[in-house]
Amino acid sequence: MVGTDRIRLALVVFVVLFAQVLLYPGVPDLLAALGATTSLDAGMWFLTAEFLGFVLFAGVWGSLSDSTGRRAPYIALGALGGAVGYAMLAVLPVVGITAFGAVLVLRFVQGAVTIAAFSLAMTMLMDLDGGHGKNMGAAGIAIGLGTALGAPLGGRLTTIDPLAPLYLASGLLALVAVLTIFVTDRAPKNHDGVAATLSGLKKTPVLLLPYAFGFIDRLTAGFFALVGTFYFRTAFGLDAAQTGLVLALFFVPFALLQYPFGVLSDRIGRVGPVVVGSGLYGVAVIAVGLASSLNAARVGMVVVGVLGALMAPATMALVNDLSRDTERGVAMGGFNIFGSIGFLTGIVVGGAVADAYGFLAAFLVAGGLEIAIALLTIPVFVRLKLEKQSLFGAEAGR
């Protein structure tokens, strides 16, 4: 049944994100355990290595699934590979391997395989009937819940053992590999091959619109994963567990509101949630950096979470609105490529700006870019030829 498969696929997305975010609050402590310094620079490279794997392999997995007409086996393979990768990271210091270069290589490989589970589970949600906003809302709430629960639990586990989040992440991804056995593959059959699939994607350049928003939205996510973590720990003297709770103030509303906001975008269209939501989101990000107290920063994080929930499922649904049925895997793979590049940019640029000019400057850059992309794309949305119910809203669902 569609409803059951929607829940199972959302659970896959949840586990992948939960496992990933378990590490974030305790990155400084984890780096020390893995043999690196607890500097901002080391954290930047640790997070970058994984997302470089995401960037380079999201499209590969997507095109492979489109050309073979199968997705579930690759999700299982990606989840199992991710489980092995996390476990090997945890084992490195135990067996005496402390070279940080080895850690980075392993992180890259782990990211390259894990992206298959994440991206293709989202693609399988796109294959379902019932409304693109509803299906992407299910993906969004899974993403949000995974990050919401992962941050505080990861912080708490880090205070017990910095390697504990790695062990838990490995076990959960192994369970995901088993879960995909019970999901029905509904991928449209496309036997034209990978090259033809990629060629077809080039004929839909309008996909660059949601890709641009995916890039900038994930940029702020990468920014908070690295700069936000160090900001809360440095500016307010928080430990890993306390930092995880502050990050959860963003992720909880981000999780709980994505499904209803996704359904809302089916009814009112994508423009308002994407454009208006992104502009206000950028303002809220800057407000967190301007906060004069921990309580003010906490309020700002809640606002950021609400606005993020407004725009995220509508942006993902727009990918589905614009892509061909037989190219959904590549379309969502492209979205995740741009998103992963954005995450990398948020880590690298945010880390560099914070290191050179301070945390406030970094918040201004991250929030300012979000506002800029919203303003620049308004004319593009106006000219976009898309079904009325998808763009500006009319009847819900398909």
Image (cartoon, rainbow, N blue to C red):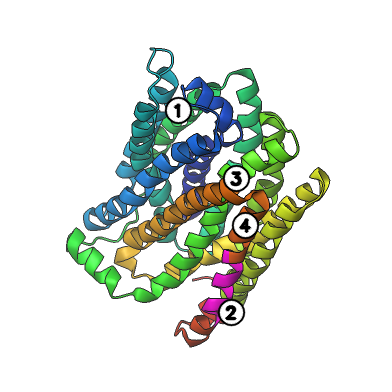
Above or below residue 102? Residue 206 is: below
* Secondary-structure class at tag 2: helix
Residue in the foreground of this view, choosing between 45 and 379: 45
Marked residue nearer the N-terminal end (1 or 3): 1
Marked residue nearer the N-terminal end (3 or 2): 3
**Mark 3 or 2, closer to the camera:** 3
Which span is picked out in magenta?
369-378
Q: Distance between the residues labelled 1 and 3?
A: 25 Å
Marked residue nearer the N-terminal end (2 or 4): 4
Residue on which disc 4 sits: 258
Q: Can residue 396 be seen in this view?
A: no
Marked residue nearer the N-terminal end (4 or 1): 1
Residue on which disc 3 sits: 227
Residue on which disc 1 sits: 170
157 with respect to 317 (left or right): right
- Which residue is pictured at 44% across the width and 39% down the height? 45
